[in-house]
Amino acid sequence: MPIGTVARNAAVGLVLAAAFAVSGCRVGTDVPNVEQAVLTDVEGASMAVGLVAATLTHSVFSENHTSFQHEHGVSGLHSHPMSGPWVHTSPEDDGPALGHHNLFEIDLSIEPDCPGGGSVLYEAQITGEGDPRVENGVVHYVMLQMHQACVMPIEGDDFLLEAAPYLTVESHATNAAGTARLYGSVQGSLAWQAESKGGSCAIDLGWDESGASLDDIGSLQVSGTMCGVDFSTPLTLD
């Protein structure tokens, strides 16, 4: 997937910190004034799986944490793989020679498109070491997600999702000593509108799966509550 625009922008961190401090890592109830309706069990589970799949796609399975850019010395603007090594071969380059040290901390803002139109704004803080997809390492995403006229097709209907005001999300991947793990959560509330009904609802989702490597985790179980629907359903990882 294309590499997101990564900026070490302290303002993003301040926005996230303030939002988490105010919300206590929970989302408020500032939702649009629409006639409340309920989702069927199938619609609730499908929406939950769609939210988690998009989260994984744009976090631990993305390219956002696998490389970074900086500029210095005769090399000018250039990239390094996040997994290292960060060594410059030019003796004239006055930049840092950090060897194989590969710890990283990134503030990230991206706005990918939704399957049926609209978008989701992701404001993320990413920390980790290495790339757990291909080697020993860890990566941790703490995110705010803001749906903006995001259309998600569910059971033959188009559901329009709107931020209310945002979701708090954690997405983590680890790989060490022959054991990999994917785990995370999506919490908060979301406003939705289908052709014949609409409403807003509380969301509390989680997942936690392990395997010999991240590639060996072919599916994970998404469990929790989605719009009053308690469920546990598998999500197949492509």
Image (tube, rainbow, N blue to C red):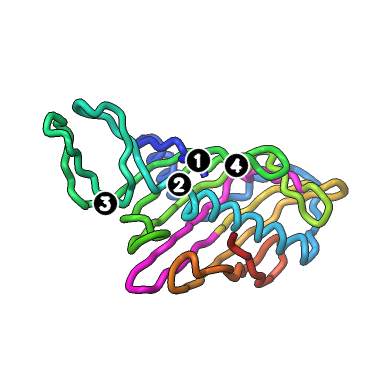
Q: CA distance from mark 2 to mark 3?
A: 16 Å
Looking at the rendered structure, the kind of residue marked 3 is Asn
Asked whether the beta carbons under mark 1 and mark 2 sit within 8 Å of each other, the answer is yes
Residue 214 percent location from the top left of the image: 46, 65
Q: Is residue 153 magenta?
A: no
Instruction: Give the mark nearest the N terminus, 2 or 3.
Output: 2
Asked whether the beta carbons under mark 4 and mark 1 sit within 8 Å of each other, the answer is no
Looking at the rendered structure, the kind of residue marked 2 is Glu
Q: Which residues are magenta?
A: 159-185
Q: Residues within 10 Å of mark 3 (few under 14, many from 20)?
A: some
Q: From the viewer's side, name the closer residue of 166 and 55.
A: 55
Instruction: Name above or below for residue 104 compared with residue 220.
Output: above
For residue 42, what is the image quadrant?
Answer: bottom right
Judging by the rendered image, the residue that carries numbered circle 3 is 102
User: How many numbered badges does the structure rendering display?
Assistant: 4
Q: Which residue does the image show at 68% across and 42% down from the upper left?
A: 150
Q: Which label was assigned to residue 120? A: 4
Q: Is residue 24 visible?
A: no
Q: CA distance from mark 4 to mark 2?
A: 17 Å
